[in-house]
Amino acid sequence: MRIARFTSGDDPAYGLVDAAGERIAEISGDPLYTKIELTGATHLLEDVRLLAPVIPRSKIIGIGRNYADHAAEMGTEVPDEPLMFLVPNTAVVGPGDPVVIPEQTHEVSYEGELAVVIGRMCKDIAPEEVRAVVYGYTCANDVTARDLQRSDGQWARAKGFDTFAPLGPWIESDLDPGDLSIVTRVDGEVVQDGTTADMVHGVAALVSYASRAFTLLPGDVILTGTPAGVGPVVAGQRVEVEIEGIGVLTNPFVSR
Ligand code: MG
């Protein structure tokens, strides 16, 4: 299923998007917490505005340098264990929303990534148990102020500015994340072209590892790292992250 969050002018609602990506069938309540029940209302997708499919209640966990070719282009090694960082939920925006480049940075980069959405509370789970706690997958852009990432020494500000965590366009709940093409385009030009098969630590290992540090709650999001090809994006450009089996997340970049 493709689970989206949207507005048709009223309060945000959730819905199921059809395979053609043309219609959305409204559901009652938040499907993370309640059984999916259709209200009977449907909309053309072009008539609604899609919102971030999930606003994490507690946390976004980012994973750094999880593709060897990206670690190499950064002049760094792949860490022995997953390198985790936290992003505040106030950084989340939805498909089509502008990413606002703040005045504190002069070097912003896109990072196309597969995002894992947690569906059940869990702690200290084994990799074999991960499938049961994953709600689904969506596209993410782990927008990074590269200059501040270097100068700050830790990544809270560089990754955590408001609007720096676009998610969408929806959550795909039926997906094997093992070998999905992940492509990023800037103004239509392909800049990243990778596959999730090249992750150093796969989804099961990452979620298990994160759960050994943090209790994972429904709606928590884990960003699984970016393949090679990161680079600058400036105000006026548009970044698309397309993941096989999910869809395309598009965001314009603007300056403050
Ligand atoms: Mg990243």
Image (cartoon, rainbow, N blue to C red):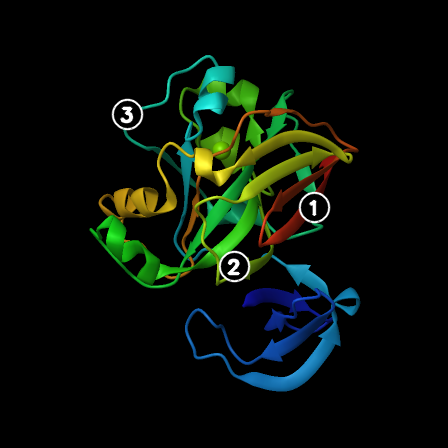
- According to the picture, the residue beneath numbered tag 3 turns out to be 80
Residue 125 as seen in the image, left or right of residue 190? left
Query: Which quadrant is the N terminus positioned in?
Result: bottom right
Where residue 213 appears, as percent x and y from the top left, is 24, 43
Numbered tag placed on residue 54 in the rendering? 2
Where residue 57 appears, as percent x and y from the top left, is 42, 58
Q: Mark 2: which amino acid?
A: Val
Where residue 154 appears, as percent x and y from the top left, is 40, 25
Query: Which quadrant is the C terminus positioned in?
Result: top right
Q: Earlier in the sequence, mark 1 or mark 3?
A: 3
- According to the picture, the residue beneath numbered tag 1 turns out to be 250
Q: Mark 1: which amino acid?
A: Thr
Residue 124 as seen in the image, left or right of residue 149? left
CA–CA distance in space, label 1 to label 2: 16 Å
Quarter of the image for residue 231 reads top right
Is 61 rendered above or below residue 10? above
**Measuring 60% from the left and 65% from the top, which residue is drawn there?**
5
**Measuring 28% from the left and 25% from the top, which residue is drawn there?**
80
